[in-house]
Amino acid sequence: MNKKIVALLSVAAVASTMAVNVSAEEDLITVGYAQVGAESDWRTANTESFKSTFTEENGYKLIFDDAQQKQENQIKAIRNFIQQDVDYIVVAPVVETGWETVLQEAKDAGIPVILSDRMMDVADDSLYTCWVGGNFVKEGETCANWLVDKFGDEEEVNVVTIQGTIGASAQIGRTEGVDNVLKDHANFKILDQQSGEFTQAKGQEVMESFLKSYDDIDVVICENDNEAFGAIDAIKAAGKTCGPEGDICVVSFDSVKAAFEAMIAGDLNATFECNPLHGPRVAEIIQKLEAGEEVDKIQYVDEGAFDTTMDLEAILAERLY
Ligand code: GYE
């Protein structure tokens, strides 16, 4: 073949693969995810669930933003997504309030906003398309009912709570759920509650200060597993014991793998499940919206509870997060 023709043919070949790539890129659904941060094992599993679901092979382009637990960073991220004209915005809001302005901006730009994990508290719920996540109030009630079962009519049960990030749905709901049940059991006395920001380090710090202030703690409720890991370290460092055989009963939320290890080690009494694997659930919502179908406004995920009476090794072997 003549050299010129070969050259022309190869230019044409390159141009056509470029065209394929460009159109493949254009067919992708662009999703901006405004994530809370990387504060806990739960959060890491949640991020991983989004990253492994919203891949190019699955037809998506994911723009991921880690807000480092700061609402102002999330608002900035959402504005960036709007500027980039993404197809969908997904938000796991750090706290519930203060979102109206930025949601209105997304609405004006015609970009649907899907809430996942935590809720937003806005008067006009047309500002978001739908929400999917755990039932935090129910989780709190399940936890308190477990405590009532365990302690029965024991004369005085002194409780401290290491709360999550104040104003986050998971904190508000779990605190409320526990109160709903314990208010009818006068033998339970809440000595104190303080935020551990959903982190192990802060959980440890708060427990250290509780242990200095009170010498008669029977139960510590940790609003996530990572806070419990910190609390367990603080209890041991103070020369006390915890878990089913110990001085202090430790319970927490999420049910990540490390919580099963802590129960097997005899340090943690129980963990109440909150499922972080929202990537496929949000993808299903987006696919329905793409097909012009209706989606439920509020979708709760089923969740269980685990304690040391169960075959934890067997459950752990099957656990996905
Ligand atoms: O419990 C905690 C995380 O919002 C349900 O956030 C989520 C909570 C989860 O930091 O570990």
Image (cartoon, grey):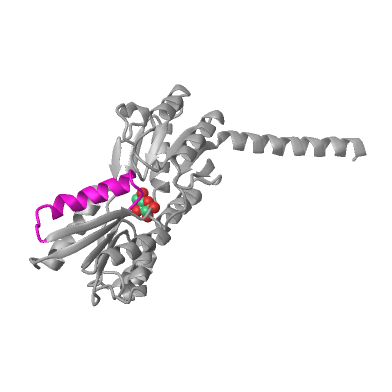
Measured from the top left, where is residue 87 in percent x and y?
49, 32
State whether residue 185 is above or below residue 126.
below
State whether residue 22 is above or below residue 308.
above
Measured from the top left, where is residue 115 in percent x and y?
38, 39
Q: Is residue 78 magenta?
A: no
Name the image quarter holding the C terminus: bottom left
Q: Nearer the viewer, residue 60 or 80?
A: 80
Residue positioned 37% across, 70% down in the render = 233
Residue positioned 38% across, 45% down in the render = 281
**Left or right placement of residue 199 versus residue 182 in this view:** right
Q: Nearer the viewer, residue 78 or 134?
A: 78
Task: Give the farthest residue toward the top.
Answer: 108
State whether residue 79 is above or below residue 163.
above
Task: Give the farthest residue toward the front.
Answer: 213
Measured from the top left, where is residue 288 in percent x and y?
39, 36
Q: In which quarter of the view is residue 42 placed?
A: bottom left
Q: Is residue 167 magenta?
A: yes
Total numbered labels placed on residues in the image: 0
Residue positioned 45% across, 25% down in the render = 105
**Left or right placement of residue 70 versus residue 4 in this view:** left
Q: Is residue 319 visible?
A: no
The segment highlighted magenta reads 164-187
Name the image quarter holding the N terminus: top right
Q: Is residue 145 visible?
A: yes
Measured from the top left, where is residue 68 in percent x and y?
48, 47
